[in-house]
């Protein structure tokens, strides 16, 4: 324990107020590092490399705050990056930005709001199609988006990071459709925290997306896995057509 303590920055060291949560985060992080190799899907990556090249994603959905915090702690998450464009919830006010940030910090977690650049409702009018739909593929090329993804990668080097949005299913969220492909390009493997704390690997989520789009011929255990990349890009575009943010005609004037 002394060794782990000395590795922590002073601001990250547990206080009596949140010692229990922080200790749980550290313990869970150690356990998770033993299992992340399998979830990463890369047989040539060492456990150390896999641990430093992993980012969680999570959707708060309708969880109670305590369950949400407990789930993060169970998986060793230390920093929460909020990627909601509008960090507020009328139905679930416990996830409004201000109280959430306070509660996360009190529980020993770091909070970063990245919704301005990584949110699914960008303010840049040039990434909206004529029908009001956000073009995720175009948005991924934006300078501010690229810079913020790079920041997430840097944050993940020294701690377990989770990208947080609202949707429970990553396939329905821009964190999977827009952010995760860029993380993969940078050698970072997303792992998705699902309801009940169950982990879904990026590979499993991709296979599920392919299956939903009648592309099972390109899933991991198929004979045509070599063509997987182009099939997956097509599936991502289809999924974005259904789940990407679409601005109403009147709203386009606000961008």
Image (cartoon, helix red, strand yellow):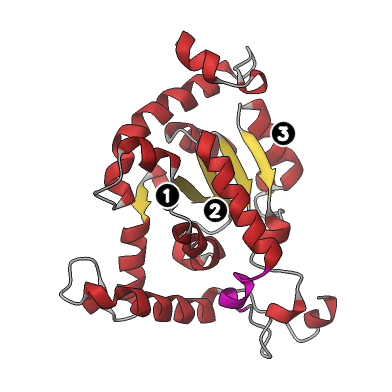
Please say if 243 is above or below 91: below
User: Circle 1 sits in a helix, a strand or a loop, which is it?
Assistant: helix
Q: Which x, y percent locates residue 62? A: 55, 51
Residue of label 2:
61
Helix, strand or loop at disc 2?
A: loop
Residue 36, placed above or below residue 174: above
Q: Is residue 142 left or right of residue 160?
A: right
Which residue is the site of mark 3? Answer: 102
Tag of residue 246: none
Position of residue 8 in the picture relative to residue 51 (left or right): right
Tags 2 and 1 in contact by the CB under 8 Å rule? Answer: yes
Q: Quadrant of the N terminus?
A: top left
Rounded to the nearest whole Å, what is the CA distance between mark 2 and mark 1?
9 Å
138 in magenta: yes
Image location of residue 42, percent across then percent down: 29, 52
Q: Is residue 131 magenta?
A: no
Residue occupying image coordinates x 34% and y 79%: 231
Which of disc 1 and disc 2 is earlier in sequence?
A: 2
In primary-sequence order, the first of circles 3 and 2 is 2
Q: Which numbered mark, 1 or 3, is in the foreground of this view? A: 3
Residue 83 percent location from the top left of the image? 63, 55
Q: Residue at x 60, y 18 (%)?
A: 13
Give yes or no for contact between labels 3 and 2 (Cβ–Cβ under 8 Å). no
The single residue placed furthest to the left in the displayed view is 223
Quarter of the rendering containing residue 50:
top left
Classify the position of the C terminus by image quarter: bottom right
Q: Which residues are magenta?
A: 135-142
User: Which residue bears the numbered disc 1?
Assistant: 195
Disc 1 to disc 3: CB gap under 8 Å: no
Kind of element beneath mark 3: helix
Q: Residue at x 66, y 86 (%)?
A: 129
Q: Is residue 142 above or below residue 8?
A: below
């Amino acid at each position: 324990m002394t060794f782990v303590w000395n590795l922590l920055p002073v601001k990250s060291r547990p206080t009596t107020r949140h010692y229990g949560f922080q200790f749980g985060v550290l313990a869970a992080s150690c356990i998770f590092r033993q299992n992340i190799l399998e979830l990463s899907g890369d047989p040539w990556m060492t456990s150390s490399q896999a641990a430093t090249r992993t980012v969680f994603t999570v959707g708060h959905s309708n969880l109670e705050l305590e369950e949400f915090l407990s789930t993060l702690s169970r998986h060793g998450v230390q920093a929460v990056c909020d990627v909601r464009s509008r960090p507020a919830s009328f139905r679930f006010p416990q996830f409004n930005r201000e109280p959430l940030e306070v509660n996360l910090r009190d529980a020993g977690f770091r909070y970063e709001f990245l919704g301005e650049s990584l949110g699914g409702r960008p303010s840049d009018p040039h990434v909206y199609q004529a029908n009001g739909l956000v073009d995720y593929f175009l948005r991924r090329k934006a300078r501010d988006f690229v810079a913020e993804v790079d920041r997430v990668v840097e944050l993940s080097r020294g701690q377990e990071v989770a990208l947080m949005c609202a949707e429970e299913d990553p396939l329905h969220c821009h964190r999977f459709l827009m952010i995760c492909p860029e993380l993969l390009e940078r050698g970072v493997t997303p792992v998705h925290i699902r309801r009940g704390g169950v982990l879904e690997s990026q590979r499993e989520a991709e296979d599920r997306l392919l299956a939903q789009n009648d592309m099972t011929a390109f899933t991991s255990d198929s004979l045509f896995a070599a063509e997987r990349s182009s099939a997956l890009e097509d599936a991502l575009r289809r999924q974005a057509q259904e789940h990407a943010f679409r601005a109403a005609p009147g709203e386009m004037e606000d961008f």
